[in-house]
Every structure is written in structure tokens, then in C-alpha cells.
Amino acid sequence: MEVTMTHYLVLAALLFLTGMTGFIVRRNAIVMLMCVELMLAATNIVFAVFARAHADGGGHVFILMNFAIAAAEAAIGLAILVEIYRRRRTVNVDDLKALME
Amino acid sequence: METFLFWFCGAAMVLGGLMTVVQRSAVVSAVWLIFAFVAAAGIFALLHAPFVAILQVLVYAGAIMVLFLFVIMMLQGPVLEGERRRMKPALWPAVAIPPLAVLVLVGTRIADHGTAAFTTPLPAGFGSPTHVAELLLGRYLLAFELISIALLVAIIGALAIGKEERKLPWK
Amino acid sequence: METHANETLLRWIVLAPLLGAAVIGLLNRRLPRRVAGLLACATVGLSFALSVVVFLRMLGLDPEHRRLTDILASWVAYGNLRIDIGFAMDQLSAVMALVVTGVGFLIHVYSLGYMAHDDGFRRFFAYLNLFIFSMMTLVLGENLVMLFVGWEGVGLCSYLLISFWFDGEANAVAGKKAFVVNRIGDFGFLLGMFLIGVTLLPHLAPGEGAFSFAVMQHHAPLLAPVATAIGLLLFLGATGKSAQIPLYIWLPDAMAGPTPVSALIHAATMVTAGVYMIARMNFLYVLTPTAMAVVAAVGAATAIFAGTIALAQNDIKKVLAYSTVSQLGYMMLACGVGAFAMGIFHVMTHAFFKALLFLASGSVIHAMSHEQDMRVMGGLRRKLPVTWWTFLVGTLAIAGVFPLAGFFSKDEILWKTWSSGNTVLWVIGFLAAGLTAFYMMRLVSLTFFGTNRASEEVRHHIHESPATMTVPLVILAVLSIVGGWVGIPAFMGGGAHFEHWLEPVFAGGHAAGTHGAAHAVHDTTMEWILAGASVAWGVLGLLLGWIVYTRRLAVAEAGRRFAGGLPYRILENKYYVDEAYDGAFIRPGYRLSRTVLWKGIDAGLIDGLLVNGSALAVAVVASVLRLFQNGMVRFYAWSITVGLTVFVLYLSFSG
């Protein structure tokens, strides 16, 4: 069977749903961040697919933007986690309920 | 050949993703994630995005994941904590239904409308470093500059968060 | 349209005082007093110097091309509406610019002395500079909208400066009154401007600035059908700014501000803005005899009305204030009979002698330890020699004694009124001229002659003012003497230079307007007779005032008793106009506000239904939503997932 655009998009969807589900089921904040990275990777694939479809390199540029965002997000997220761990001695989000009023 | 590579990389990527999610140990999760990212690089290459593919390996699988592993090692002890309890079986449907619904939707749509192929012919050198660089420093220069500011802010923010509180310059 | 020469100096004339205002206002107490005062004077001085430079450059040009423009930027460009931020100077603006910056500079210098011990010294100069900036925007604005910007700017500065000593409630109330009354006038101005816009815009090519004076003049015939409406609406604005009946009531109260402010804003410059605007729009007014007649009638009525009130005031500044209202009436009268040049001529001479009178009265008040009641003054002419002599010059000038400045402008206005056939208006104006002489002499007699009636302590402190105050007085006195000589009329062998200078601006006015010019050539005897009569009449008024209030104070008392007290009381209470307005507009307004707007709409509808109602709705919704905020991050993530899924399903099934 020939590989079409649809194949790539379904692949990206699978990766995204995996990451999304992982974000819900996991309790370890570090792994949750990894799941976010998975979802971002899935978006990148969609960008690449449509760049290919329209023969427009703009998609590639925005993948690079996404890289930068992912890096920034990872840096900030991990810094927050380290700080939380210093104070609370845990990175289990179920134990972190300060958000509730 | 392309067909084979697609199935190979795609399967590897999805496998990597799933293993990332289901592994109990954060270290093992991280290694599987690197695996998935390298596979994704292959997908990028198949999509005529060689430059992005290389950056995916260098930046993502390399730099960002090293950062993750580094933090995991800093927090050694507790990384397994919390995963000892399984999720209550009663909640499984709640988690599973939304993604499954989307998958069913995608399936029915494909069954109804079939698949769409790539039709636009690509110019020579599409996705090469030269091509991307010309766009990045030409048409998208403003976005490029703005994202550099965002990165700068992230660096400063990470430093400010990570610093011991009493040493903050403004306190 | 004629071509205009470019002149980039214009922007600096306007912007220099703004710069001063910004620096002084922003740095405020960080700036030493001396520096703030000098900076304020220097920026206005610079404005004046640049005005002179541009004026000299204009003299070198052909009279038809004496219109210099300086466009800074495009402000509004929408459809075929175009409004520029720009300045223009023609003969009319040049006269105004020189008067405003020149007199403004002298008053700045005077204020250095007058305000020397005031806590708000820097704030005062920041406002004063801001005022000069606004006034120059008004005078040099290239289009009606720029003029309006300046118009509002001077209104704001007037408000700020009237209530400059805002810790006194009367001052704050006076400022508010000036502001509110001016708003009524501005409302008319705005409507007039809109009417010009809707009339002109459909006929203009894109890029033609509809409100540019040159464009409006060029397309004046298009405005003819609505000229009366526009003229009356704009005149409503002018009655507010230039204190004409029925909106003059704010000006006497505005005397609550510091005396230099009364001199600069409420006598010499700002209040003449209405006259300037009407002269500027002369091409429109000549199209509408009705509006012209209204302008003339209101002007004449104001002249005599305010003159009679001035007879019975005891506050030295109030007398001058009503005198200002009365003189503004003369200017309006001039515009109304088509003698725009004479109106502007009187603006100029009046700026000299009225600024002089106010500043000299400030010097008197300064010497009298801030006493303003003339009944406790008297005999000051030996103690304050400079003030006395300059005040006397001002008085003679305003009374129209030959050959002082006031004579030429006032006589010319009366002559143009006569020669345009408005005999009734001439009689009114003539009577008002006599009144002017009489009440001014009354003021001089009570203040400078006789014996001093103040308390021992005040009398002990009486002293002549410092040089920063007296030098401007002397300069203004010289100007009050020679200022009129630029306009010596033709029948006296003069060149009528002033009128000729302004001729290109008012070219349309002469064509359609008075037949006075034709008269003048044939019939100079009548002019001589009228001029002689007005001088004699003025001198008579002066003499009468002097005799009654210096020699025979008893006579004055007897006259007051003879008048039965009632007419006098009416005059003293300013015809009860304030009380009438209070009953007719203000109280009903209060009642409406209280019962309907406040209790009904604000408290009932807005507070009750909208404010409390929406708060209640939020509270109800929140009590449900609160269940969802349980602090579980993963629950939040799940919620997002569900929402996203529903959204995707909706999208795919709806489209």
C-alpha cells in the first residue's frame, strides 16, 4: 500500500493521543512533562506534513519555533519541579494540592 | 523503500511513545522517549525535512532529553514514588473514552472519504538548511527574533526559580 | 488654491512653550525655583523671537503670498476626510502670534515677581507655558480642528489656573463654573464643525483637508446654504470663550485666579479667541447677514450691559473683568458689522492696555496685602508712583483719549458701525464708551486719590513692587500709548497700515460686506465729527468720574441714595443673572439628576439590576463551578481532554 498524507497524519494523531493519555494517567511530574514533549513532537509532524503538502518551508520554520518553545518549557518546568522538590520533597502531583483554594 | 521506512519508523515511534507512558521508572521512560524522538526524526526525513530531522536528533533527543535525565538524577530517590499505586479500574473508561472516540472518528472519516495523497511537487533543495535558513532570516525574521526573546526570558526565569530564595537580587 | 510657502520655524514657535511646560511640570520640585522661572520665560521669549523672525520674513514677501505653512504629520486620513497636524501663519495669525507671545512674555516676567513667594511657583509656570502652547496652537492651527484643539487646551489651562489655589472652595467653584459654561459654548462649536464637515466632505476630492482654512475658503460657496446655521453655532462657541451674553457669567468669577492669569488669559489673549475665530472664518460670516447681525447685536448688548455692571462693583478686579467683557463686546460688534480688521485691531490694543491695567491692579493688590476691595484703598498715587502712572496711561487708553491706543481702535469700530448704517448699535456703543471712561475713572479715584482707608497695619506695608513687576508695566504702558499708531486711519492722514496689512485675509469680507470704505473717501467730515464726539464724550466721562469720586464723595453717596438704592442694588448684584440661571437651569438640573438619574437610573437600574445582578449571577455559577476546582492537576488535564474531544467531534459533525 502506498504511503499517503493520511498515513502520516494518523501516525501523528496516535502519538498525540498517547502523550495526552499519559499526561492524565501518570502521577510523576517529570514523566508528565515528557508526555507534553510527546504531544509537541506530534504537532511537529503535522507541521512537516503540511509543509510537504503545500511545498512551503514555513512549516519547517515553525517546527524550529516549536523546538525553542519545547526547550523553554522544559527548562522552566524542570526548574519549577526542582524547586517544588526542595520544599515539599515530592514530585507527585497528587500530593500537590496548593492550587485548591 | 519509502513504504518500508514509514512503517518501520512509525511503529518504532508509537512503540517509544507507549513505552514512555507505561514504564514505571522515570529513567526508563526517558530512554524510551529518546527512542521515540529518533524514530520521529526518521519520519521527518521521509517528509523531505532533512534539516528538521537532524535538529530533532541534536536538539530534542540530545539536549532536551539530557536535561530531563539530569533532573531525574538530581531527584533520584523519589522518581518512582506515586507510581506504586495503580489507577482505580473504575476510572479507566473515563480516561480511555475520549482518545478512543477520536480514533473512531478518524477511522470512519477515512472509511468514508479515503486517503489523501501528496500532490504538490517539491522544488529542489526543499527543507535543506539553506532553504530553511533563508526563510528563517527572511520572511520569518520577526518570529525568529521574538522566539529568541522568549528563550532569553525562559533562561532568566529558570535561573530565578532555581536560585535560593534569600539570594534573589531584589529581596 | 494659492501655493503656500513652507516655514518650519512655525512648529518651534508652538512647541517651545510645550517643552518648557513638560520640563517644569515633570521635574517640578527637582527643579530650583530660579531655573523653573527662567526656563518658562525663556521658552516664551524664544516663541516671541521666532514669531518676530517669521514676521520679518513675511514682510519681505508679496502680500498675496504671505501665508506660510508647516505641516508636521497627517492626523486623520480616512476616506476623503483628511486632517493634518500643521500650522499656518498669515497676516491675521501673525498679529495674534506677536500679541500672544509678546504680552505673554511680559506677563511671565511679571509673574516671576508676583508669584515669588507662592508654594505652587513651578506648577504655575508649567500651566502658564502650557497655556501659551495651547494659545499658539489655536492661533497658528492650519485647520479648524487644530484650532479646536488649541481652543480646548486654553479652556483647560484657564480652568487649571482659575482654581490654581485649589484649597479655597470659591476658587475651585469658579474654575468649575468657567469650565462648564465653556463646555456649553464648545458644544455649539463642535456642532458647527460637524456641519461644515458633512456639508463639504461629499464635494471634496480625496486628500483635500476639509477643515483646512484655505480649503474651506476656496469652497465657501458650497457652505452658503447652511452658512447661517454654522455661523450661529460657531458664534455660540465664541460667546462661551469670549464671554458674551448669555455665557459671559464665568469671566468675572474667573478673577479668583492669580492676577497675572487674569491679565494674560482672561483679558489679553484667551478671551479674544472667539473674536479671532470669527475673524478667521470671515469668509463664512460674510455669506450670512443674519448671523452677522446677531454677532453685532450681541456684541453691542454685551458692551453696554457689562459696562453698567462695572459701575457698581467694589472689587478692583471685578471692575476690570466687566470692563473686559464690555470691550470684548466691542470686538464682536466690529466683526458683526464686517469690520473684522478693526475687531482684531481692538484685540491688539486691548491686549496692551488691559494687560497693563490688570498687572497694575495686581501691583496694587500686592501692595495692599491682598486686599481687593476698593473701598478700603485710596491715596496710593504717592506710595506706588510707577503703578500709578502706568495705571493712568491704561485708563486713558481704554477711555479712548487721543492719541492713545484705545482711541484708534475704538473710534474705528464706532465709525464702521455708523458707516455700515447701524445707527442704533452705534448709539449703544457710544454710550458704552462713556460708561467705560466713567467707571475706569471711578476705579482710579477710589484707588489712587483721596486718603487711604486701610487699617494701620496694611498701610504700613504698602510698598512699590519689585523691578520684575514694574518693568513689564512700563513696557506695556509704552505699548498702550504707541500701539494704536500702526492703525492711524486715512482721514487723519495716517496710512491705516493695520487695515491694509490684514486686507488679503479679509478680502472676501470687503467685497461682500460694508460700504464703509466708499463712504470714507467722500465724507471725512462725518468721521472727524464722530471722532471728536467720542473723545469729548470719553473725557467728559473721565472728568465726571474724577469729580464725583475724588472731590465729592458725598455727591456719589447722594446720587446712590437718589437712585433709590434699587437700580444700584440691581447693578451691584449683576442684574441677578447668576441667580436667574441658578433658578432656570441649575436647580432643575439638580432635581433631574437627583430624582431620575441618580435614584432611578443609577441606583435602581445600574446598581440594582446590572451591578448587583451580574454579581449574583456570578456567585450562582461559581457555586457550581467550585466543585470542579479540586486541586487535582490530572483532573484538570482530563477536563481539557474531554473538552477538546467534544470540540473535535462538534467540528467534524457540524461541517
Image: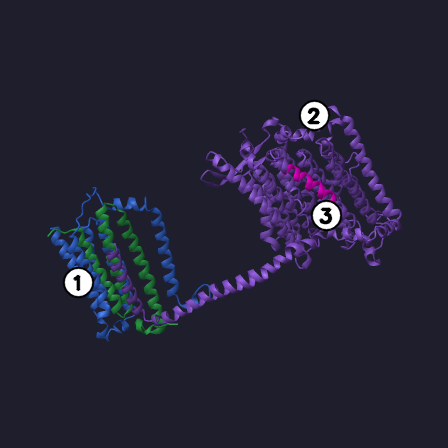
Chain colours: A green, B blue, C purple
**Residue C163 in view:** no
- Depth check, front residue: A66 or C201: C201
Q: Which label number is shown at residue C518?
A: 2
Q: Are marks 2 and 1 on the same chain?
A: no
Categorize mark 3 by other alpha carbons within 10 Å: few (<14), some (14-19), many (20+): many
Q: Percent x, y for residue C393?
A: 79, 40
| Callouts 1 and 3 in the same chain | no
User: Which residue is depicted at the point 28% across and 73% down?
Assistant: B78
Q: Give the image location of residue A68, x and y in percent.
A: 31, 55
Marker disc for residue C321: 3
A48 relative to C297, above or below: below
Span highlighted in magenta in the image: C291-305
Amino acid type of the residue tagged 2 in the rendering: Ala
Position in image of residue B103 (x %, y %): 19, 61
Q: Is residue C256 on the magenta stretch?
A: no
Amino acid, disc 1: Leu
The amino acid on which the numbered mark 3 sits, given as a three-letter code, is Ala
Are the residues under badges 2 and 3 in a single subunit? yes
Q: Which is more N-terminal, label 3 or label 2?
A: 3
Q: Secondary structure at mark 3?
A: helix
Q: Are marks 2 and 1 in contact (CB under 8 Å)?
A: no
Q: Residue at x 32, y 64 (%)?
A: A78
Element at label 2: helix
**Residue C234 sits in which quadrant?**
top right
Q: Is residue C304 magenta?
A: yes
